[in-house]
Image: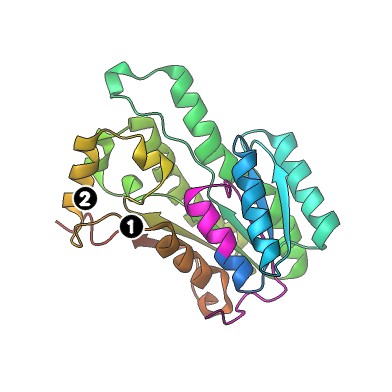
Amino acid sequence: MARMRLKNKVAVVTGAGRGIGRAIVTIFAQEGAKVVVNYNSSQKEASMVVEEIRKMGGEALMIGADVSKADEVKSMIQRTVEHFGRVDILVNNAGIMIPSSFLESSEENWDQTMDVNLKGAYLCCREVAPIMLEQSKGKIINISSISGLFERSAVACVDYVVSKAGMIGLTRALAVHLGPTINVNAICPGTVETDIVASLDPETKKLMRDESLLKRLGKPEEIAYTALFLASNESDFITGEILTVAGGRGMR
């Protein structure tokens, strides 16, 4: 049952139309947050999320923005403040993966992956940080990946792995620069049932499943509840941490 741990908080969740982002924004709304459902290409899915949240009595604002573009990120945060008056929580979830081996990869795919996954998180943090500092409190949660920690995951896509490792570095650096006012943490999910994972070949997915001590894929909701903890006051003494939620993957 919802404990309203985020009552009256305003949360911006990027890439919230599908997968982990959708689960996060829904659970945040159930816990009392006013949420911004960001999307880029998945407008239909984002509309459905907003409708579901409003049906259950929550407040949601849908904003389309490409997080790799500074002007669109700036506009998204400005609209959030105009509508809700503040920003208490930012979840940098938007991400892409373009499967390819290193020798078959392209500069275009590298740039696109870095722009969305890493630069996008940087741009969003840059826009919300002054607001949170003015409010004297804020929570930033970066959705990285076990791929940024566990070298065998590099078999899937080198640029994706590097971008997620970069998010870990960004998390730790911002925790230093934005403390003690803003808590900045990262979640490193293992293999979760999302569209990105569905795009992988069966052999890669089997490898990821077998590497998990629990011998299964994760569910988006399991990552969302971890994000809820980091967004709530229960995690006020945690910052600069990398929380792995991977079913034991990478332990052997």
Whether 22 is among the magenta residues is yes
Q: Amino acid at mark 1?
A: Gly
> Residue 16: x and y, percent?
58, 50
The residue closer to the viewer here, 39 or 113, is: 39
Q: Amino acid at mark 2?
A: Arg
The residue closer to the viewer here, 77 or 203, is: 203
Mark 1 neighbour class, 10 Å CA radius: few under 14, some 14 to 19, many 20 or more: many
Which tag, 1 or 2, sits closer to the chain's start? 2
> Which quadrant is the C terminus positioned in?
bottom left
- How many marks the image carries: the answer is 2
In the rendered view, would you say 120 is above or below 232? above
- Horizontal relation, residue 111 to residue 6: left or right: left
Q: Which stretch is magenta?
A: 1-26
Q: Which residue is mark 1?
A: 218
The residue closer to the viewer here, 212 or 183, is: 212
Q: Residue furthest right?
A: 82
**What residue is rendered at 29% in x and 23% in y?**
102
Label 2 sits on a secondary structure element that is helix
Picture quadrant of residue 131 = bottom right
Residue 182 seen in the figure: no
| CA–CA distance in space, label 1 to label 2 | 9 Å
**What residue is rendered at 57% in x and 82% in y?**
3
Label 1 sits on a secondary structure element that is loop
Query: What is the basis of the colouring in this image?
Result: rainbow
Q: Which residue is mark 2?
A: 209
Picture quadrant of residue 157 = top left
Residue 154 seen in the figure: yes
> Residue 36: x and y, percent?
69, 55
